[in-house]
Image (cartoon, coloured by chain):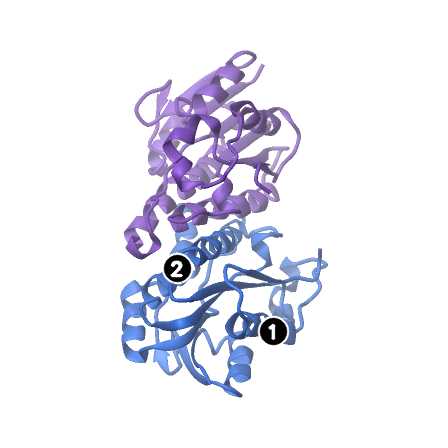
Chain colours: A purple, B blue
Amino acid sequence: MMKILIIGGNGTIGRKVSAHFKQKHDVLIGGRQSGDVIVDMTDAQSIQAMFDSVGAVDAVVSIAGEAKWAPFETLSEDDFYIGLKSKLMGQVNLVRIGREYVNAAGSFTLTTGILADHPVRFTTSAAMVNGAIHSFVKAAALELKDGMRINVVSSGLVEDAVDKYEEYFPGHNPIPMQKVINGYIKSVEGSGTGDIIRMYDNR
Amino acid sequence: MMKILIIGGNGTIGRKVSAHFKQKHDVLIGGRQSGDVIVDMTDAQSIQAMFDSVGAVDAVVSIAGEAKWAPFETLSEDDFYIGLKSKLMGQVNLVRIGREYVNAAGSFTLTTGILADHPVRFTTSAAMVNGAIHSFVKAAALELKDGMRINVVSSGLVEDAVDKYEEYFPGHNPIPMQKVINGYIKSVEGSGTGDIIRMYDNR
């Protein structure tokens, strides 16, 4: 049994991932508004306080962070920084700070999405953030110590979000939730590191 | 003959790329300390002032921007922001602001590097920034109008930088400068858009 901290564990994907891991593991949910521990991913001090509160864990799973979706010609510099501060540096800080709290042979699992590889319109900011995390994960895997691992799950449009997002993803095949959950299982319970676990069904 | 603005045109790669394009085109060099126009890539207002000064161009080539190389465990949040503000948002702002100044069917050519795909140690920040730009370029290509194109050249360790960087890139085959120059030629004089022009010789 592992002690697993899941940030964003009450979200669309997070609640299914959490439900799965709770069957076998000790799961703590971190959330912006609700959860076992409250955390603001845009604030490194809040992330530090979360780890101080939670203590040592075997796995950290992040399914959190946002970026602004809008036409490129309307995005201001500040709009780009929403994604940089939240989904990008939030997840980077989670690893940067959290590596002091993850047990030997423990793992980090971050979350991005298909936009990194196959963007759609209005996602210059979101795609950019996702691509940044993919390369970060590959690079960080080279330096983590004590058998600590890091991977990222990048899914296509998930089934449970089709109603909300399908107009942005013309012709994209929805990804079954079980496949998405399997991405997180592969990262947390598998042995890979530096892996971009792609759950796509388009090409 | 095109009017080409090359930011970083006096750097290691930039001076060879500029020398090539000067044979056939009207080239303006933008640089932090020297050039036909001075520009601070970390400052959107400076980029705006540069375009106001230079006016309409047919191609913008960026071979500029920096990121901090250091062991992951020593990188602070502010250290990561060096690369985000310079090499990442500098190049994003160049496109965001510059699209008003590039002629129809004109192009942007950005620069990253092999770390996006094949990082080495101490490059969590640099790899992240490069990966971000790759995805940004793919996404921006979907939205640029009037036949405007955008690509990015991603080279391995270039011949002219081997002395300075080879200790970071064990076993990497240096990329001949002419191949790197060809990446920029392909982007500026070719017809592709959304392309990551990889000049690697490792895998």
- Check if mark 1 and mark 2 are on a common chain: yes
Q: Is residue A161 left or right of residue B198?
A: left
CA distance separating discs 1 and 2: 23 Å
Badge 2, how many Cα within 10 Å: few under 14, some, many 20+?
many
Q: List x then y, in percent, for residue B184.
A: 55, 72
The residue that mark 1 highlights is B182
Q: Chain of mark 2?
A: B
State which quadrant residue A63 falls in: top left
Q: Is residue B8 left or right of residue A197?
A: left
Image: A167 above or below B76: above
Relative depth, front residue between B45 and B3 = B3
- Is residue B15 visible to the viewer in this orientation of the structure? yes
Residue drawn at (47%, 27%) of the image: A159
Give residue B11's position: percent from left, percent from top.
50, 75
| Labelled disc at residue A167 | none
State the residue at coordinates (64%, 69%): B162
The residue under label 2 is B92
Q: Is residue B103 above or below residue B92?
A: below
Q: Chain of mark 1?
A: B
- Taking the image as shown, residue A77 lies to the left or right of residue B87, namely left
Q: Do the residues bearing badges 1 and 2 touch, measured as CB atoms within 8 Å?
A: no
- Look at 44% across and 83% down and name the residue there: B27
Callout 1: helix, strand or loop?
helix
Q: Amino acid at mark 2?
A: Val
User: Which percent across, then down, holds residue B68?
Assistant: 47, 56
Q: Is residue A41 shown left or right of residue A99? A: left
Q: Amino acid at mark 1?
A: Asn
Q: How far across and how far down the image is residue B137, in percent?
A: 47, 57
User: In the picture, residue A14 is in which quadrant?
Assistant: top left
Disc 1 packing (10 Å; few <14; some 14–19; many ≥20): some
Q: Quadrant of residue B201?
A: bottom right
